[in-house]
Image (cartoon, helix red, strand yellow):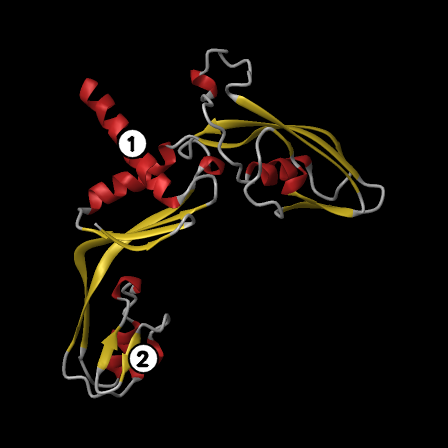
Amino acid sequence: MKIIQKSKEKLIFSAEINESLANAIRRSVNEIPILAIDEVEIYKNDSALYDEIIANRLGLVPLKMEKNMNLKEECTCKGKDCAKCTVQLKLKAKGPCIVYSEDLKGKADVVYEKMPIVILNEDQEMEILAFARLGKGKNHAKFSPGLVYYRNLADIEIKNCNACKKCVEACPIGLISCEKKAEVKDVWKCDMCEACVEVCKKEGNDCIKISPNKEVIFFIESWGQMNAPEIFNEAIDALRDNLKQVEKA
């Protein structure tokens, strides 16, 4: 494995693994327990948005993970919403104002404080009690920790280039430079759209050939509940646990 880019928000690496394993890791990301608003009691909503829309927007607000929380179905309280499996958040606002995610008050903190929920006009009010629980992305997208995808690294072969620079103009992400002949920088960014190949053929040439490499480029972009490298490690653990269940079966 080779790290290409690494930060809290984003992890990009290349690896010599087959696509079935890469896909298993990608799918296992949705096995990671993530905290999100799961149920909402709306006592007052004078805004222009329906209750269901407000509930949906609240569910998509990323929340910072609480340590030592249990999944509701695995908790010793047997679904009675104890402090070990459920966190309560309150929201109370009066217009005129924009209601932001930071207005949610409780034992769980929001990741991004300025996510707009709704606009309240003068004398409009909103009062909400929300219940946040752990869940998995395979059951609902709001429990997803981030965006995870992969693609094959591109093999780009350039021969007999006459430096017409048409391929430079055609590349939508500007990967090609051309002085004496065409050259590709940051090959890992190439998504094999073949725009350069097509324009080269239109000019009557066949200088550029693109084919998929055995190497895979893996991308992980976090929504903020956990760091991107942590998402990868947790996905590996989830995959390993599932394989143990298969062995037992």
Is disc 2 placed on a helix, strand or loop?
helix
Q: Label 2 amino acid? A: Val
Q: Which residue appears at 65% of the width and 38% of the height?
A: 54
- Left or right: residue 218 versus residue 68 is left
- The label shown at residue 237 is 1
- Earlier in the chain: of badge 2 and badge 1, it is 2
Question: Label 2 belongs to which residue?
Answer: 168
Q: State the separation of the CA atoms marked 2 and 1.
A: 43 Å
Q: Which residue appears at 18% of the width and 22% of the height?
A: 247
96 or 6: which is nearer to us? 6
30 or 76: which is nearer to us? 76
Residue 51 x/y as whole percent: 68, 35
Is disc 1 placed on a helix, strand or loop?
helix
Q: Is residue 67 above or below residue 6?
A: above
Mark 1 neighbour density, 10 Å: few (under 14) some (14–19) many (20 or more):
some
Residue 50 x/y as whole percent: 69, 39
Q: Label 1 amino acid? A: Asp
